[in-house]
Image (cartoon, rainbow, N blue to C red):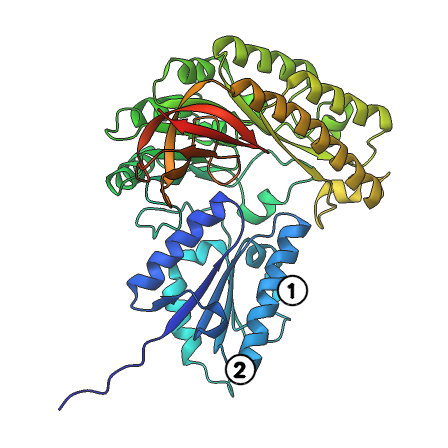
Amino acid sequence: MKGKQQKVVTVGFVALGCPKNIVDSERMLAGIGGAGFVISPDVDNADVVVINTCGFIAPAKEEALGAIAQAIEQKQKGSVRKVIVAGCLSQRMGDQLASMKGIDAVVGLAERDNIAAIIRKTLKKSRRQGGMEVYVSDVDSHVADDRGRFLITPAHWAYLRISEGCDRHCSFCTIPAIRGRFRSKPEDMVLAEAEELVANGAVELSIIAQDSNYYGRDLGRKNALCELLKKMEKIGGLDWIRLMYLYPAGVDDELIETIAQSERIVNYVDMPIQHINNDILKAMRRTDRKETTMQLIEKLRAAMPDIVLRTTVIAGFPGETDAQFAELLDFIKWAKFDALGCFPFFAEEGTPAAELPDQIPEEIRNERADTIMRTQQEIAFEKIDALTGKELTCLIDEAGPGDEATGRYYGQAPHIDSICHIKGCKANAGDFVKVKVIAASDYDLVCEYK
């Protein structure tokens, strides 16, 4: 006698947040699919909706809460059976989320790999039983193994996380409270994951962490990042290694030399500075200073004249005077970063900066952020114009339609930077091609296939 056929359970998944969160989403998706659930693109009509949230700053929280509210609304309509909230917002606001009617389970960061079992347990609870289960535990002893991911990036590039947490304790930042102290991932685990990603087709890996150049220092290893990079360079088939999230005070001569001498580590450095005025930096609890940051930029450009520099800054930090803001603006004009992101200051609950006196009105914070971005736009357009007529090597991200493809040269990081529109190109995604820059389209480059 044949057994009763089990109903297929569909899971809609919403992935929010930064690259670190994307890696967590990819691991959860692998666990969900591996457990026999069907991952559905229709999150409004799935049996279970899992939302992997970000909780770093106010706009990220608002986005996450909006996605949660939408899932709960679909549940109330009967289109969704269960709603599970995971990720950073769960870790940060587990108790507050527990009071939201309609959420069935709240899952913290350390419980990421148990998501399939949590879904099963949640499904077993009837509407009559109701109630919410909270799966939030301490993260400080947890170092995630990110191998075996279900990639939501294209196969030819991927993120490679080398650590968790942060020990910097910047006064504006919620990361230590959410993701805990800094924990380096074991080197053999990182290398095994890199080899796995390359074996699956990745030719570009973006190194990510909360503080990438602190890698290994929690274990007493000063130059661990350089040693790791040199071992990664030996992986056959890996053409581009990209360094993201470098803390300025930790960029030393050995790291600069490692990048400069490498044929695989691209001359691209993502180095958030946050501000340049020394009094503001002190209030931010940053260890870098204006003089050392300026010297570092000069040193990087001397070692690699073609280096592409990306940074982020905060406008309207508590107590920021007009003169201090003007100093930041003058520095941006001097530094001429290739790419820059600016956030108006957000007073995040639980951070020391939220309790500082002389909070800047929101209108002024936004005005200052807009001024910085308009200034950076002029710089970026000058940089783009200077590339016209140059020949570049591009990695194809998407082919077609027709004979036009999109890709990136080494100075463009995936998802956050501009792209290249390549005419007369029928190469496939993951291929490297030679192009000539013929024009600009806003921040993008228009190229012709060589």
Residue at position x 48%, y 26% in the image: 411
Camera-nearest residue between 16 and 374: 374
What residue is shown with label 1?
Answer: 96
Estimate the x, y position of residue 345 in percent, counting from the top left.
73, 40
Q: Is residue 84 above or below residue 343?
A: below
Residue 3 visible somewhere in the drawing: yes
Q: Is residue 328 above or below residue 341?
A: above
What residue is shown with label 2?
Answer: 130
Estimate the x, y position of residue 367 in percent, counting from the top left.
80, 38
Q: What quarter of the picture does the C terminus occupy? A: top left
In this picture, residue 9 sits left or right of residue 349: left
Estimate the x, y position of residue 31 in percent, counting from the top left.
34, 59
In this picture, residue 216 sits left or right of residue 56: left
Q: Quadrant of residue 239?
A: top left
Camera-nearest residue between 305 and 55: 305
Residue at position x 47%, y 68% in the image: 43
Taking the view exactly as shown, the residue that stands out farthest to the top is 302
Q: How many other residues sit within 10 Å of disc 2, few (<14), some (14-19) or many (≥20)?
A: few
| Amino acid at dot 2 | Gly
Camera-nearest residue between 422 and 65: 422
Kind of element beneath mark 1: helix
Q: Earlier in the sequence, mark 2 or mark 1?
A: 1
| Amino acid at dot 1 | Gln
Taking the view exactly as shown, the residue that stands out farthest to the bottom is 1
In this picture, residue 278 sits left or right of residue 408: right
